[in-house]
Amino acid sequence: MLRNCRLLMPFSVLLLMLTSAMGQDVSDEDATGSGDLKNEQMSISGRYARFEKMLTQMADIMARQDPERADLLRRALGRGREDLLREKIEDAVGLLSDGDLGAASEKQQEIVASLQSLLSLMQSEDRRSSVERERERLNGVLKNVRQVMERQKAARISTQLSPAPSDAAPRQQQALDEAESLLEDIKSHDGDGEDQGEGKQGEGKQGESEDSQDGTQPGADEQGQPNSENNGNSEAGEDGEPSEQSGDSESSEGQSSENSGQQGGSGQQQNSPNTPQTPGKEQLQKAQQQMQQALDAMQEQQRDQALKNEDQALQELREAEEKLEEQLRQLREEEKEMMLASLEARFQRLLIVQTQIHESTISLAEVPKDQWLDLAFARCREVAQEQTELARECAGTVALLQEDGTSSAILLAVEDIEADMNSAGEWLRDSDVSELTQSVQQDVIDALKQLVEVMQKEMQDMQQQQQQSQQQQGTNSQQSPLVELIAEIKVLRNLQLQVNQRTQRVDRLLQTVPAERLEALRQQISELSHRQERLLESARELQRRSQSQR
């Protein structure tokens, strides 16, 4: 992985150089002759062409070892082609040749914007893994918040039913200890410089005041700023923004970073501007204060006041839970968007290569096999190897969908594609380019086209939902599915149609194929039986999902 990161670095550097060169062209065009500008623009055109070629080669090299980064490179290629970057650069050359500096300047500005967009995409290769890590962390925090809520509910019941309020103090102390432990973990992650030991031993409001006055760490500044800085961090963490947005609170983040840098190596790492701030932290701090006040009221035998504080603590915990759930929903949507883009790039790649293999198979079949020369047999073995390698690449997509675990029909479709690719590869190794081989390859192509359409449609729907800003709120304890239920049902329907059509085709071929091909057809019948059973299982799973959504 580290090696691949290093391999990607030159591409980002080259993009930076191209962007810088384009910016220089725009700014210096009044002071430079149009002939010199034309030559510089032609040089940039050549560099971008080499950049595209290197990107294509590296994507092919990394496809097997690191398909995720290969997908990123292909998406970058696709983004450049969608933006017509090469055409724009060539247009700029033509405008400079004509001496139209104004139009050339406008065109160059468009090129710079496209290059900057491409650079942002190239630098986002680790975003998905960071989103996964953050989702895992926040799920753990959410689980702990709910555990504290259960403890607090039990403490409140004990306060209400105990003969004396002080008898319920141990349960309240237990809930308070768990809340403080959770806050310590959160502050450690967010890079707060507050003295955790003082915070845990504080006594009510007086304890909070003593923390701000006497609990200053040796690494804090001489004016005793840690508390105000931590408050700033709490506000930054409350809004629940993703990691790249948390850097917007520049003053609070910068001050916390300075303090933690003086406190030690671990704090310095955790207080990076890119460290995601935990949503709901401020509500947890308020809940902690209410718990402490409830404990003080119990010790003074003030039942009503203790119950009031406990109710307020529960309300703050519920708000913290809601903020965590909302942030988890946003992260899941971001992860889904990246996953859909990755799958769409994979399916596009598989479709292009499978189409080429299919065309080669048809070309070989145009000559009767009894007339093949050694060159034709060698070419057939090459095509078989290409088909087998493509099946291995498809297996990586199967693993990706299995890891996500939210889309049964899409997974089933890709598993069938992999199986068909392997079957076609075996037949090609036997120099079989018959109708069965060609028809199975065509089924693969049709299935891939449908999956590309599904991914594109899902991404369009997600963009529309984001623009409308009316996404449904709800509990995010379970992972939302990669694609909507209706899309999975359509995929399942097409898989059933494919099974029906292939059954009819195999039945027809059984009447005409030579005896040596009967075994392959019998294997297909067994495979079709297995697929029919899996289709039934997937249909039942979709039915259960449909009923759960009612």
Image: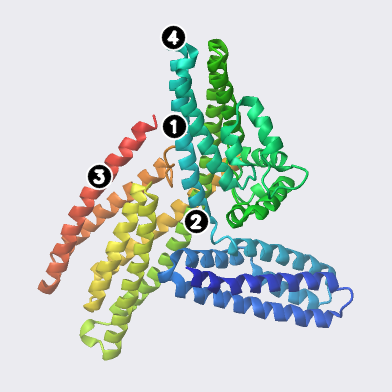
Q: Residue furthest right?
A: 31
Q: How far apart in space, not on screen, are marks 4 and 3 (Cα)?
A: 57 Å
Q: Secondary structure at mark 1?
A: helix
**Residue 470 is at least partly visible in this image:** no
Residue 161 as seen in the image, left or right of residue 242: left
- Which residue: 49% across, 51% down? 133
Question: Closest to the observer: 324 or 382?
Answer: 324
Q: How far apart in space, not on screen, are marks 3 and 2 (Cα)?
A: 32 Å
Q: How far apart in space, not on screen, are marks 1 and 2 (Cα)?
A: 27 Å
* Residue at numbered disc 3: 537
Say above or below: 96 vs 396.
below
Q: Identify the mark nearer the N-term, 1 or 2.
A: 2
Discs 4/2, front: 4
* Residue at numbered disc 2: 129
- Which residue: 85% across, 73% down? 28
Q: How far apart in space, not on screen, are marks 1 and 3 (Cα)?
A: 36 Å
* Residue at numbered disc 4: 163
Answer yes or no: do the residues labelled 4 and 2 have beta carbons within 8 Å?
Answer: no
Disc 4 marks a residue whose amino acid type is Pro
Discs 1/4, front: 4
* Residue at numbered disc 1: 147
Question: Closest to the observer: 477 or 250?
Answer: 250
Crowd tier of the residue under label 4, counting other residues whose Cα lies within 10 Å: few below 14, some 14–19, many 20 or above: few
Discs 1/2, front: 1
Q: Identify the mark nearer the N-term, 1 or 3.
A: 1
